[in-house]
Image (tube, helix red, strand yellow):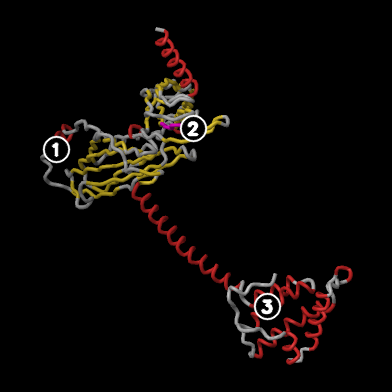
Amino acid sequence: MKRLLAILLILITQRAIAQGHCFARIALDRSSVYVQQPFKVTITVLTPTWYTQPLEFDNIQIPNAFTLPFDQTTPGMFDVDGKQYAGLEFYFIVFPYQAGDFTLPPINIVATTPPEGSSTATQVKIATPARHFTVKPVPAKLKGNDWLVAKNVIISERWNKPLTHLKVGDVLERTVSISAQGTLPQFIPTLPSENLSFASAYLQDAELDDERNEYDANGRLTQSITYLLEKEGDFELPPVTITWWNPLNSRLYKKSAAPATIHVAPNPHLGMMTTLKDSLAATQTKQVAKPAKKGPYTIAGLPWYLFAAYAIGAGLLLYILARYGYLFVIRLRARRSAYIQSEPFYFRRLRHLSNSPSGVIHHFYPWWDRFHGSGPSPSVTLTWQQEKEQPLLQSWQSINQIAFNDTQAQDGQPPPNLKQFKVLLPDYRKKRKRMGNVPHQPVIGQQQQPWT
């Protein structure tokens, strides 16, 4: 009995610990909207360990509003007061249809997660805090128009026959399609009734299509008008016009389909006009709305086929950049490797790194070997004696005498013969290159290293 009580106590303690560390956060992207203006509700469930089962939550019911849930749950890591939590995030969109002040009620959630320090998962019941939001009525200046909140609207129409060679008694059918992005099809206003002097208009019931995708709501309204032409003459069928308010930039937009101009010719055979009108009136039956359907599967807000095309293009571009970038680096390294073994490289070192007699001697012979190419390098003294380079030879001999006698320059300045040598040597190098009798070889074997 005591063992059983201990086990129950441990289980209760673990459940309390898990429930104390697993919690939910809720966020509204806006707390004040107009009627029909959607707002997004994001719920994040956090735990310091991990989840072993999908989340379970109640049906979301909000007064005086349509709710559009999205089933996809996104995992991630979240920082809360400097501590890392594993989180599952999901969201839904709320479409209020009545003005007033409302409260988003708490939403009960069941998470399956082990408490800290344990590997045994337990079910934890948590609830989101309540959130208040305000729904503003339609602006006074827009109450006369059909109010629609949408990101964009597209109108298209088609006719059952060409609008030519018409006569009294003919029947025209006009089908109008209104597609709205970012709203539900229930909010798209239906076509107004028409009172025409030259025809009788019969308005059919609208068909509503829910075309939501993975990230947003979209809807389409399709409605037909049947015209019975009763008078001859030239007339204009009024265009379909729709006005909507865009919540992204808080601006009002208006769009119309093109008006249709027709010519109605006389018809001597009008005996069936009354019967035809009665038949049209009798066929006005209620049409059933089409079942909701989802749009194409989207990835990051793009249809899957566009995302795939962009991904393939990006992959090819990265492959080309990586391949040619690698070849460029290889060639650059080869050129660099060749350059650091070349005569110009060592001559540059001799000019810029030799600030003392011993430094000149240290950098001179690696350059001299490369300047005269492969094989034994000729004697510096004999070469300049034969070429009658007396100023250069005198400077060289003076530099060697100072270097080997450890004689230092006065006041920390290079001796004058060193400055003269650095002036004469580039001129000598240019002259020998112009003569073309120097067996110059820019690259020597890797085994020949500078003196150290």
Segment tinted magenta in the rendering: 86-91
Q: Earlier in the sequence, mark 1 or mark 3?
A: 1
Question: Disc 1 vs disc 3: Cβ atoms closer than 8 Å?
Answer: no
Q: Is disc 3 placed on a helix, strand or loop?
A: helix
Q: Which residue is mark 1?
A: 276
- At 71% from the left and 74% from the top, the residue drawn is 363
Q: Which mark is residue 367?
A: 3
- Magenta segment: does it hold 88? yes
> Is residue 321 found left or right of 189 in the rendered image?
right
Quarter of the image that includes the C terminus? bottom right
> What's the amino acid at mark 3?
Trp
Question: Disc 1 vs disc 2: Cβ atoms closer than 8 Å?
Answer: no
- At 25% from the left and 39% from the top, the residue drawn is 224
Can residue 452 be seen from the camera position used here?
yes
- Of the pair 212 and 4, the residue shown nearer to us: 4
Q: Which mark is residue 29?
A: 2
> What's the amino acid at mark 2?
Asp
- Residue 427: percent from the left, percent from the top? 73, 84
> What's the amino acid at mark 1?
Leu
Can residue 134 be seen from the camera position used here?
no
